[in-house]
């Protein structure tokens, strides 16, 4: 029996990667990471189709004690191990907090892709220095009422509402309080 050999041409796929840099990253370091990403994509025979810097944004949760990060979006076309190599290089960068890659399209014809030079231009990130607002310890622990837009009410509001429910009448006494006042049942002993 003769072995049939088939050669499959590796098909290109379109990917999107978003990586987040530390919020206090300087423009030189950000540019170094951008250049590294472009270098890896071209070295692995891929093509950058779009690069966008989304700027500094608040993170959903602290990552390595960072509350803000600089988001960068990269869209590219490539084959085989391009994604693995790109993610390996992002892991090696100290300025990168997180990254995620998503497959957009399976079969992409690289020859049919038109690339706008303005969309792949690696612009220098010039982020204004941002004052980190100091959050009080009480607010961080949730001990301060956040105002009328907060979904919970303060303790004073609940106490006032409970007193209003009883109106002008005295609050009902418990059985132990009645017994101590002489209005309760006797326990069989004469006083």
Image (cartoon, grey):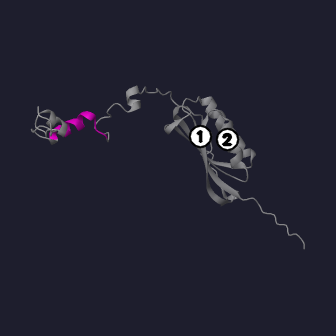
**Mark 2: which secondary structure?**
helix
Q: Nearer the viewer, residue 100 or 54?
A: 100
Image location of residue 132, percent across then percent down: 46, 27
Left/right of residue 175 with respect to residue 20 in the rendered view = left
Q: Position of residue 4 (x, y in %)?
A: 85, 69
Magenta stretch holds residue 160? yes
Secondary structure state at the residue bearing disc 1? strand
Residue at 70% from the left image edge and 42% from the top image edge: 88
> Is the stretch drawn in magenta largely helix, strand or loop?
helix
Residue marked by disc 2: 37
The quarter of the image holding the N terminus is bottom right
Of the two numbered discs 1 and 2 on the same chain, state the one appearing first in sequence: 2
Q: Position of residue 84 (x, y in %)?
A: 70, 47
Mark sitting on residue 98: 1
Residue located at (85% from left, 67% from top): 5
Quarter assignment of residue 185: top left
Residue furthest to the bottom: 1
Q: Position of residue 36 (x, y in %)?
A: 69, 38
Q: Which residues are magenta?
A: 152-164
Q: Quadrant of residue 149?
A: top left
The residue most toward the front is 189
Front in this rendered view, residue 40 or 190: 190
Q: Nearer the viewer, residue 68 or 47?
A: 68
Q: Is residue 25 toward the left or the right of residue 10 in the image?
A: left
Taking the magenta stretch, the answer to whether it contains residue 51 is: no
Q: Is residue 147 above or below residue 119?
A: above
Determine crowd level at label 1: few under 14, some 14-19, many 20+ residues with C-alpha closer than 10 A: some
Answer with left or right where residue 144 lies relative to residue 26: left
Q: Is residue 136 visible?
A: no
The residue most toward the right is 1
Using the numbered discs, state the Cα–Cα distance from disc 1 to disc 2 in whole angstroms.
14 Å
Q: Tell us which disc is closer to us: 1 or 2.
A: 1
């Amino acid at each position: 029996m003769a072995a049939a050999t088939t050669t499959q041409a590796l098909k290109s796929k379109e990917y999107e990667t978003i990586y987040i840099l530390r919020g206090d990253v300087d423009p030189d370091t950000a540019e170094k990471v951008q250049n590294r990403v472009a270098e890896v994509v071209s070295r692995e025979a891929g093509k950058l189709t779009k690069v966008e810097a989304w700027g500094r944004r608040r993170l959903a949760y602290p990552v390595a004690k960072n509350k803000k990060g600089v988001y960068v979006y990269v869209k590219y076309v490539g084959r085989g191990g391009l994604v693995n190599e790109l993610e390996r290089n992002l892991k090696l960068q100290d300025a990168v907090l997180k990254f995620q890659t998503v497959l957009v399209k399976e079969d992409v014809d690289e020859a049919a892709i038109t690339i706008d030079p303005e969309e792949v231009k690696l612009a220098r990130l010039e982020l204004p220095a941002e004052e980190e607002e100091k959050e009080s310890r009480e607010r961080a622990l949730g001990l301060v009422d956040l105002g009328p837009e907060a979904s919970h009410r303060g303790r004073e509001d609940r106490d006032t509402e409970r007193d209003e429910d009883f109106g002008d009448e005295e609050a009902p006494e418990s059985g132990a309080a009645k017994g101590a006042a002489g209005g309760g049942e006797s326990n069989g002993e004469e006083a």
